[in-house]
Image: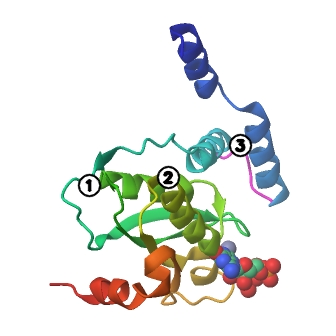
Amino acid sequence: MSLLQETGERITASLPDRRSENAVAELLLALGQDLDDPNLVETPRRVAASYRELLRREALTMTTFPNEEGYDELVLVRDIPFTSLCAHHLLPFRGVAHVGYLPGARLLGLSKLARVVDHFAHGLQLQERLTVEIADYLDAELMPNGVGVVLEAEHLCMSIRGALAPTARTRTSRFTGALASHGRDHFLTALRDRD
Ligand SMILES: Nc1nc2c(ncn2[C@@H]2O[C@H](COP(=O)(O)OP(=O)(O)OP(=O)(O)O)[C@@H](O)[C@H]2O)c(=O)[nH]1
Ligand SMILES: [Zn+2]
């Protein structure tokens, strides 16, 4: 990427997004809010910027290393925190992801598991789709012998409104390859084993 291109993109990213701001102002007005209230004057700009940030996906770099020693046990990273936005209410759902894989020819930089979760969590999501996207991306990019992804989350749309069930947690999972056919119990046991 040329310097000019990069600078141009940075300028574009920092430009105010009038259309989003106007839409937020219109929504607040429609909801009977007073836009002259000193606390609301800057709110359309802040809300537009917040949603842009929550929806923007960072590019992914999958740093891998040759599996020279033939490590063939589960690599499991537990309790990766994530926050996403529910596609139905635009309210957050947040919790933890447990992501693991059975290595093939390559080992993945551990932080990349957290980055993949973060990448797909940005956007308007369903927890089921987020789970599948994380697992299928790792499967396609890393070509391991199997991938396991378990997500546990609180959906604010069902805890602070609507069903008003603040203690409810939703668990979703996706297993591929050997973890789908016979390694699922091993994965779930490793997840429970907190020593
Ligand atoms: N399957 C699934 N459903 C979700 C997710 N996030 C939110 N929902 C649900 O989407 C549904 C939308 O239902 P609607 O009846 O159209 O919306 P609503 O009137 O606001 O429903 P309530 O939340 O029950 O008040 C609700 O049952 C939400 O709990 C998700 O990640 N996966
Ligand atoms: Zn929702």
* Viewer can see residue 38: no
Residue of label 3: 36
Predominant secondary structure, magenta span? loop
In the rendered view, would you say 67 is above or below 136? Answer: above
Residue type at tag 2 = Glu
Q: Mark 1 or mark 2, which is nearer to you?
A: 1
Q: Which mark is residue 141?
A: 2
Please check the rendered image and state whether residue 119 is part of the magenta-colored stretch, yes or no.
no
Q: Residue at x 76, y 53 (%)?
A: 28
Pointers 1 and 2 in contact (CB under 8 A)? no
Q: Which mark is residue 124?
A: none
Q: Which mark is residue 67?
A: 1
Q: Which residues are magenta?
A: 32-37
SS for callout 3: loop
Residue occupying the far top of the picture: 4
Q: Residues within 10 Å of mark 1 (few under 14, many from 20)?
A: some
| Mark with earlier residue (1, 3) | 3
The answer for how far apart the CA atoms under marks 2 and 3 are is 51 Å
* Viewer can see residue 37: yes
Residue type at tag 3 = Asp
Which quadrant of the figure has residue 105? bottom left
Q: Residue at x 59, y 69 (%)?
A: 132
Pointers 1 and 3 in contact (CB under 8 A)? no
Q: Mark 2 or mark 3, which is nearer to you?
A: 2
- Which part of the image, by quadrant, shows the N terminus? top right
Q: Residue at x 57, y 77 (%)?
A: 155
Quarter of image, ligand 1: bottom right
